[in-house]
Image (tube, rainbow, N blue to C red):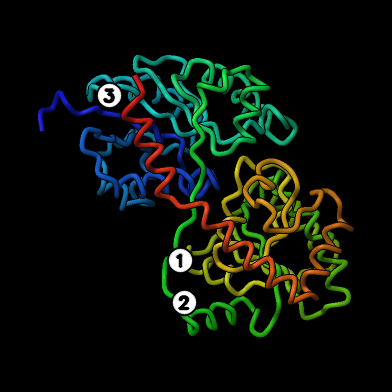
Amino acid sequence: MNDRTVRRVGVNLLWLVPGEVGGSEEYTVRLLRELAELLLDNVEVILYVNSQFSGAHPDLVSKFTTRVAPVSGSSRILRVLAESTWLAARLRGDRCVFVHHGGGTMPSFRLTPGVVTMHDLQPLANPDRFGFVKGAYIRFIAPRSVRRARTVVCLSEFVANDVVNRIGVERERIRIIPCGVNEPGVAFDQDRLARLLASLGLTNRPFILYPAITYPHKNHETLVAAFAQIVSTRPDLRLVFTGGSGSSDATVTAAIGAYGLTNDVVRAGRIPEADLDLLFRAATVVAFPSLYEGFGIPVLEAMSRGCPVVASNVGALPEVIGGAGELVDPLNVAGWASALGDLIDDPARRSVLVRQGFDRAKHFDWSTPAQSLLSLYRETR
């Protein structure tokens, strides 16, 4: 193929520190994996990553041309500096038509036109949930990035409407590219499940699963308080938290201790995707009490694995669930205790939600958003 017929598109992933950015990492990595499976006959995608990315996602590095920056990504100051210097120079040298900034911001200094993915506007909507420096930086740079981008990618209509209403961007400049849901990574393995449950003390026990890093907006404390009411009459029940430690980890641990639930709440931490897949299939119910979500990948994963869902009635969660789960005010402890307790005691209702969840999940196939992304890469000037 003649080099001049190929559109080179850069993807800025310097912001993607593995294990630290939660659902943004899941969305970005899975979308790129699906994109790699498409026939990119006239598009060459070049990934610009931090030094930690290659070790965490070797499959993407092997499928795309990849440039590794001399920064780890953990320092925001160094990453921002690298975006304005190293990245700007590499993009020009690689002759990229434009660069897709996947982390919600674009550098102030740039020589190459940009597209930006806006996962959510939580720092603008709820500034109290962020540290002063991080919050102030995002509130300063995010609106400017969105206004200057050729196209703004949003994961849901909720986020798109938020971008229009808070920043004033024209709706026609926004492209919705939602999450998809993966097929189970491994075939169901009863022996592996048995070992996993035994290691977590869950053998022959019903349990509520909440997969989320302990960030403030994930609202673990409301679920702990509701669980304290539920477990008082169901002593065999357990609450299982998976996901890494966030800035609210100490607060969550204190809440568990204050309610005397140390032996009833299982802190599994960050676990392999295959193990989480098994927990989705074994859980009695998935609870998702988040205060704000630009999408909510775990609820979609739960529905696709046959687990009923109780989630907050805020953000994009109602849009994603689409009537296939129970919705509760995220701060209503009594409401959570009632919804979860009633569902645990009602296997017929759980069966209905399982069927509805399977049907809903069928609407989210990764091939559709990957095709949309490829179209964006081919069309953007």
> Considering the numbered disc 1 on the image, is that residue within a helix, a strand or a loop?
loop
Judging by the rendered image, the residue that carries numbered circle 2 is: 188
Q: Give amino acid for label 2.
A: Phe
Q: Give amino acid for label 1.
A: Pro
Q: How crowded is mark 2: few (under 14 residues within 10 Å), some or many (20 or more)?
A: few
Q: Earlier in the sequence, mark 3 or mark 2?
A: 3
Judging by the rendered image, the residue that carries numbered circle 3 is: 96
- What number is the disc on residue 184? 1
Are circles 2 and 1 on residues that touch, CB within 8 Å? Answer: yes
Q: Distance between the residues labelled 3 and 2?
A: 43 Å
243 over 85 or under it: above or below: below
In the image, which is nearer the foreground, mark 3 or mark 1? Answer: 1
Q: How crowded is mark 3: few (under 14 residues within 10 Å), some or many (20 or more)?
A: many
Q: Where is residue 129 in the image (x, y as percent from the top left)?
A: 72, 36
Which residue is drawn at the image coordinates 74% and 75% (left, top)?
348
Look at the image and tell me in which quarter the C terminus lies. top left
